[in-house]
Amino acid sequence: MNSAVEGAVEGAKAPSGLVAKIKEIKQKQKEEQKRKLALWGDIGYHRYLGGEFYSKVLVILVLPVSLLLFAVVTEIFLPGPEINGYQDITKSLLGFFFGVMDIGLAGSQGYFSDKMERFVAEHAEINPRKAIHQIQFFCAWQMFTGLVQVTVVGLYCFFFLADSSLAHLSYFIIFYSFVQYPGMLQIFESLFQCFQRYDIRGIVTSVRDAVFAPVATIICVFIGKWVGGSNPAIGEVMGITCGFLTSIYVADIYGMIFGARLFSTKVLKQYNYRFRDFFKMEFTWPEVKEILAFIGPLQIVDMCLGFMGMITTIWITQWLTSYASWKGLISFAGTIAGLAAPGGSNKATSTVSEAYNNGKIQLTHNYINKILKYDLMTVSVNLIPVIFLLPTVLDQAIKMFPTANIQNYLPALVVLPLTIVVNITNKIWFVPNQMMVIATRRNALIVFSIVGPFVNFFFSWLFLVYMQLGWLSLILMGWIPNIIFSIIKWIYMLKKITPGFKLATWQVAVAPVVSQAGMLGFSFLLWLVMPAVIAAITAWGFLIVLVFLLLMGNAIVHQVFYTLAGGWDKDTLEEFHKAVELAGPSTFMVKPAYMVAKTFAKISPLHDRHPIKNEAIASKEIEELMALRDKNIKK
């Protein structure tokens, strides 16, 4: 009897033990979530780096959706190429007018320009009240001028364009003009960046591109096709084009609602503000004047010089035969170069602005070193493997896709080496220009803006007419002036903006170069085994292996050589660890590289021999910023 009772008691305890275990797991998950949320709240470069990691898998998930959308929409809804042509013409006709009305505050679809981002990022965490006022001004300006733009465009179409030979464009222009009201639909992408929640920014952009944009495009284009096809007065082409242009607006509206919800709950709540506060008129004239005094003159200069750029382009097309063909080949080379050495500029403006404009100069120097370190490390991961294996890969691609006319693009291989060099150097050249915006050096930016087009025109003439270099001119006439200006900008930055800056030469330059010797050996081994691998798993199987190498494999192998070469010190390795913890859904892609770096750092004789020397001072300045932020939040 007693044993039966004991058995019943133990049986009753078992479920409760299971429940307790589940509760314990949930509690640990909550604690882990709080810890990572606190990590997002700690000021430092790890937030930007973690945001870059966070977006890796999101970009991969969006890509097949975009390709599928392109295939479906093209197959079903695009009866002719003129639809895309009408879109491009419409955007070109309205682009200049929209740019004038935005006065340099906004991008093309309602997000902050880099100049506006610089102001909001300075105050976002340290003085949120002023940041909210700046956002209020941005919203008020965009909504008021957006209403003016839509009205002016509508009146122009109804009373002038309707009686011209371009009357058929009237509806396209009217539908596209809607994107200018309220004119701040993508503001939350910028705000998450300014408040340095790069993870949520990645979520908002990915959901918009992978969900809202495809759904809006298919629905709006279908409705446009149905309305146009059933009404001969409208026509199918016009209906589809109007649907396309409307889908841009619809997708951005849903993206704004989604972003507003996340921003209100994840960011604004801790500052005791609400989304509706953006639409109040609490900003003052001194706050507005500070922004306009910097952005206004730059915008005027840029508008005046845009015309000269257009004239230069027309002149080039007359001098260079097969201009369109070579532009296409250079574009193809740029795509391949992007696999070997990803181009584009860093997006750390908010992070650096917060430090520099709150008087943390040593922290700014520290950030500049890390921008250069991580940018050059990134472009060196796939560099040698792509260059080494490209001929074999292209040969396989020609066999796999015999009707794709890949042979027509092989001349782009001549352009490829120089395109890769351009991508790498642009990482370095962008920094001083970014710092001039952050430091609001208006006069210097104006001088470079005015002189730039004339220098570019001179080198265009030099390479095209005098030296007659043909297609090579298309690269050199932009790259050579960029090098010259960038050297001057670096000198200006070091003397006027960041005096006393000391480059962490080993981590920034030496370790990435040394690591390439190891990557060369790794690539040679791959080249040796490629024929056997292709024979064993077919070319399609090797394509999967190649994708894995580009996304993860090369990064893991590269960390072996980079770490052995002394690419990490104890502080930057810990920062790498923090960024990996913030990687979210991309953790599986970046954590293996960190584990390799952590392991090989223990055996590297060069580990921590060449640290970024002002790390201690930078950490102290971070503590000061966080103390100032906490003080203002409590207010």
Image (cartoon, rainbow, N blue to C red):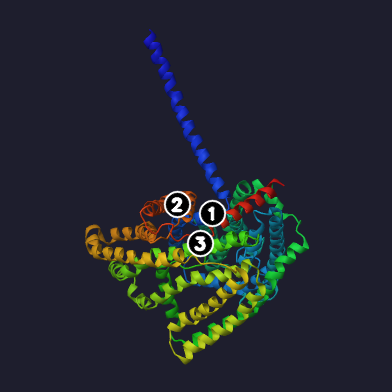
Q: Is residue 90 visible?
A: no
Which residue is nearer to you in this view: 499 or 377?
499
Which residue is nearer to you in this view: 65 or 340?
340
Foreground mark, 2 or 1? 1
Secondary structure found at label 2: helix
Which residue is nearer to you in this view: 570 or 36?
570
Which quarter of the picture shows residue 1? top left
CB atoms of marks 1 and 3 within 8 Å: no
Q: Residue at x 62, y 46 (%)?
A: 265
**Category of crowding for the residue at label 1, using alpha-carbon neighbours closer than 10 angstroms: few (below 14), some (14–19), many (at least 20):** many
Three-letter amino acid code of the residue under disc 3:
Lys
Q: Which residue is mark 1?
A: 47
Three-letter amino acid code of the residue under disc 2:
Ser
Residue 359 image offset from top left, x and y in percent: 65, 61
Return the mark for residue 370.
3
Q: Which residue is mark 2?
A: 586
Q: CA distance from mark 2 to mark 1?
A: 15 Å
Q: CA distance from mark 2 to mark 3?
A: 21 Å
Residue 164 image offset from top left, x and y in percent: 64, 78
Please tell me whether residue 125 is drawn above or below residue 96 in the rendered image: above
Foreground mark, 2 or 3? 3
CB atoms of marks 2 and 3 within 8 Å: no
**Category of crowding for the residue at label 3, using alpha-carbon neighbours closer than 10 angstroms: few (below 14), some (14–19), many (at least 20):** many
Q: Residue at x 77, y 63 (%)?
A: 285
Secondary structure found at label 3: helix
